[in-house]
Image: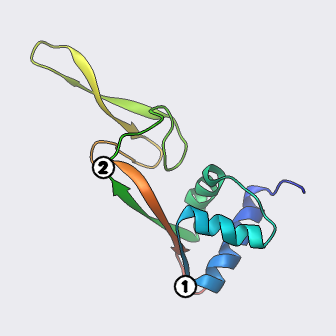
Amino acid sequence: MFRLNDDQLENYILRILKKKGSIVGEGNLMKELRKLRVRVSPKRIRRVVFKSKNIEVEIKFGKGKLINNEICPICSSPLVEIKNADLDGNLRTIGYKCDNCNYNSISKGKPYLYIFRLKYHDL
């Protein structure tokens, strides 16, 4: 099997969303892609979908700690520490943020559900 480029993968996802309307959960989207004989990682799916102008993603967040504090759980970009100074002037890390997709671990928490749908319904 050959490796799809990002545009080809986006076209497969668009084909699925045109047929289904919306897909709840990365796992369900991966199952639909497997039916079309396409195998990709969830990380790559998120990266392609967030770059797409035709697909929108709704994310549900829960209160949980990030497993990897270096990579954004949404777009896989590097995270930047959010620091705060205490009364003694000591800096301490209180959370993480992504400059690419505006993810913030303090206000949002950990993503637990992705809902994929077409941004424009006339595609």
Residue matched to label 2: 63
Asked if labels 1 and 2 touch by Cβ distance under 8 angstroms, the answer is: no
Residue 47 in the image: x percent, y percent? 60, 52
Query: Which image quadrant for residue 26?
Result: bottom right
In the drawing, does residue 38 fall left or right of residue 15?
A: right
Q: Give the CA separation, mark 2 to mark 1.
A: 33 Å
**Label 2 crowd (10 A; few <14 / some 14-19 / many >=20):** few
Nearer the observer, 28 or 91: 28
**Label 1 crowd (10 A; few <14 / some 14-19 / many >=20):** few
Query: Which residue shows up at 59% across the image and 63% down it?
Result: 27
Residue 32 in the image: x percent, y percent? 68, 72
In the drawing, does residue 16 fall left or right of residue 61?
A: right
SS at circle 1: loop
Residue 19 in the image: x percent, y percent? 65, 85
Query: Which residue shows up at 38% across the image and 39% down it?
Result: 97
Query: Which residue shows up at 70% across the image and 78% down it?
Result: 15
- Residue 123 in the image: above or below residue 42: below
Q: Quadrant of the N terminus?
A: bottom right
Amino acid under label 1?
His
Residue 11 appears in view: no
Amino acid under label 2?
Lys
- Residue 28 in the image: above or below residue 92: below
- Colour setup of the view: rainbow
Residue matched to label 1: 121
In terms of sequence position, does the residue under pointer 2 or pointer 1 come before the other? 2
Residue 120 in the image: x percent, y percent? 54, 80
Residue 74 appears in view: yes
SS at circle 2: loop
Q: In the image, which is nearer the foreground, mark 2 or mark 1?
A: 2
Query: Which image quadrant for residue 23?
Result: bottom right
Query: Which image quadrant for residue 35?
Result: bottom right
Query: Which residue shows up at 68% across the image and 52% down it?
Result: 41
